[in-house]
Amino acid sequence: MEGLFTKAKGMEFPRRILAGHGALEGLPQMCRDFQLEGPALLVTGPTTMQVAGRAAADLLVEAGYDVHILEIGQATTEAVQVVKTGVLETGSGFLLGVGGGSKIDVAKLAACDLARPFISVPTSAAHDGIASPRASIKGPEGSLSFDAVEPMGVVADTSIIIKSPWRLLAAGCGDVLANLTAVLDWELAHRLKGEEFSSSAATLSRMVAQQILDNADSIKPTLEESAWIMIKPVLVSGVSMSIAGTSRPTSGSEHMFSHALDKIAPGRALHGEQCGVGTVLSMALHGGDWQRVRHALEVIGAPTTAKQLNVTKEELIKAMTTAHKVRDRYTILGETGLTEEAAERLARTTHVI
């Protein structure tokens, strides 16, 4: 009978992922296989240009591509416009984001706005945006999350990623561990508010967070195996968002806490560092094993306290009590949030303050 079942959904995934030692060498072949037509616009930064941008450009030039390089700073709306202008002025047929999350997010959003293919070449794994269809861009009111384009391909060279500051990789672990409480929040919203829920996306998201928990003792500085352990969960987290059609599998109350901190104490800590501490707090609210999450962060070398985030007790508590206002998303924080007394008690119980 007509009209009995009308649900329809589209999902986009990376068509190819190259990950491991020396993966960058496979970039030109990936572009050829995708039948990408140049010129190419390579978006990078001053530091990441030296780390991998120049090497990536040289490889593409040797393969016969015309490559234009654009160095940008932070992920801002102005930077996105600069990249879009660069694409139009050079007539670039595709974009590459070579760098950390900010460079990739800017290139990703510009590619989305101009309907150009995009390839992600991360030089670090500080958060799960390197393979997700979302972009975090700084605006006047703080960081804003935008729908962007899923990378057509991802080239994650672990020999490059492991050379990035250890703090970045440790922060990436915090961002992936956040999946644990994000899924709990999503399940709660499904039960109490009837929010649409994807068990497939939730299972993937929870599985990769569990991998970080299980392998925390093996994630150590200078050990390339650490980058390998880390990069797979980061990539799969991005895929879980594509399956769900939302950031729900990877972003819940712990991310709202991080975004609140961004407004109250901007620039003090990295996104993944704040999300890691937020995960400890949110897991305690859910009645889960926050001690294991905290231990994993400590072993990896990520912050677990307000002091390590370079914020005061008062700033942290304010973030906890205002996090529920960050976005219209139901979580363990409820609709009215935490009182100052409850927030301080929670922070002390979990040794965050």
Image (cartoon, grey):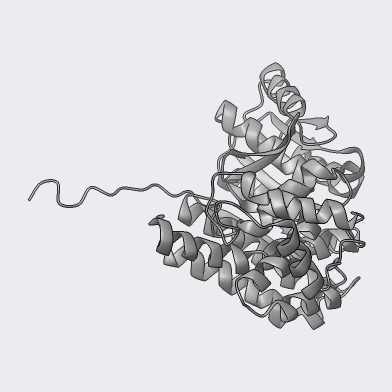
Q: Quick check: 64 above or below 225?
A: above
Residue 143 drawn at (x, y percent): 72, 39
Q: Quick check: 122 above or below 284?
A: above
Report the residue at 57% width, 62% height from top: 332
Report the residue at 59% width, 51% height from top: 336
In this rendering, position of residue 173 left or right of residue 298: left
Q: Residue furthest left?
A: 1
Pick the residue in front: 199 or 169: 199
Pick the residue in front: 157 or 32: 157
In this rendering, position of residue 34 left or right of residue 139: left
Residue 284 visible to an observer of this rendering: yes
Pick the residue in front: 157 or 78: 78
Residue 229 occupies quadrant = bottom right
Report the residue at 73% width, 32% height from top: 141
Residue 23 visible to an observer of this rendering: no
Residue 185 drawn at (x, y percent): 54, 62
Q: Quick check: 207 above or below 333?
A: below
Number of numbered labels in the structure image:
0
Residue 215 drawn at (x, y percent): 73, 81
Residue 79 occupies quadrant = top right
Q: Quadrant of the C terminus?
A: bottom right
Report the residue at 65% width, 44% height from top: 119
In this rendering, position of residue 204 left or right of residue 320: left
Residue 259 drawn at (x, y percent): 72, 47
